């Protein structure tokens, strides 16, 4: 299982933290957000245990929902491919940064777009209603160190404890 696969488990045992600023982006153009994202960093979870080279690919479906394909390699960048396919939706167009994602039937979990490169959609910072879930995504396998540091600073200002942040190995291009 991969990124976002088990967000719903976290939502079942939600530990809402009043210290975390979960404000999402005010605008999100789904057409620009679609496509492949590389996981640059994440909080560790059992559903991504030992996965590297993780990507999330989003594709618009005919029914207006979004297909989510999360993929990663087991242990090494040459390892066995692990893939999970789910769906996402924007339940409230007035809150476009608050998406819902599902990998299991009708059970949806929060997918909060906290920060986004609003100009070119080249980076994103993702959270949920729980402070246990956090990702930094990029359109390329490596992120510019200044952008990465800026996102870490924004995460700290939001109240995230980044001590457990894991920087995900990615293919060098």
Image (cartoon, grey):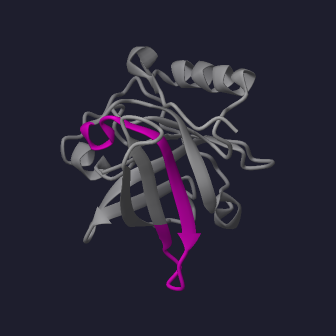
* Image quadrant assignment for residue 172: top right
Where does the image place residue 22, in percent across and percent down from the top left?
48, 37
Q: Is residue 83 left or right of residue 31?
A: left
Instruction: Say which quadrant the C terminus sits in.
Output: top right
Q: Position of residue 5 (x, y in %)?
A: 33, 53
Magenta residues, start to end: 46-67
Against 140, residue 68 (above or below) is below
Residue drawn where x is 43% and y is 47% of the image: 72
Query: Residue at the spot x=71%, y=61% of the render?
Result: 32
The residue positioned 72% from the left and 49% from the top of the image is 121
Q: Is residue 86 above or below residue 14?
A: below
- Locate residue 84: give its quadrant: bottom left
Q: Is residue 49 magenta?
A: yes
Which residue shows up at 75% across the image and 47% down it?
A: 118
Instruction: Classify residue 104 as left or right of residue 37.
Output: left
What percent of the width, then of the height, locates residue 104?
25, 65
């Amino acid at each position: 299982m991969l990124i976002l696969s088990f967000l719903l488990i976290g939502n079942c045992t939600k530990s809402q933290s009043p210290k975390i600023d979960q404000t999402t982006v005010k605008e999100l153009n789904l057409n620009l957000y679609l496509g492949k994202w590389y996981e640059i960093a994440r909080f560790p979870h059992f559903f991504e245990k030992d996965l590297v080279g993780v990507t999330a690919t989003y594709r618009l479906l005919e029914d207006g929902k979004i297909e989510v394909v999360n993929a990663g390699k087991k242990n090494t960048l040459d390892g066995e491919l692990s893939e999970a396919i789910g769906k996402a939706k924007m339940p409230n167009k007035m809150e476009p940064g608050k998406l819902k994602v599902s990998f299991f039937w009708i059970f949806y979990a929060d997918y909060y777009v906290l920060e986004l490169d609003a100009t070119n959609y080249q980076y994103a910072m993702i959270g949920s209603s729980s402070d246990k879930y956090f990702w930094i995504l990029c359109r390329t396998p490596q992120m510019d160190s200044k952008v990465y540091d800026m996102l870490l600073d924004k995460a700290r200002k939001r109240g995230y404890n980044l001590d457990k942040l894991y920087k995900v190995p990615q293919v060098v291009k």
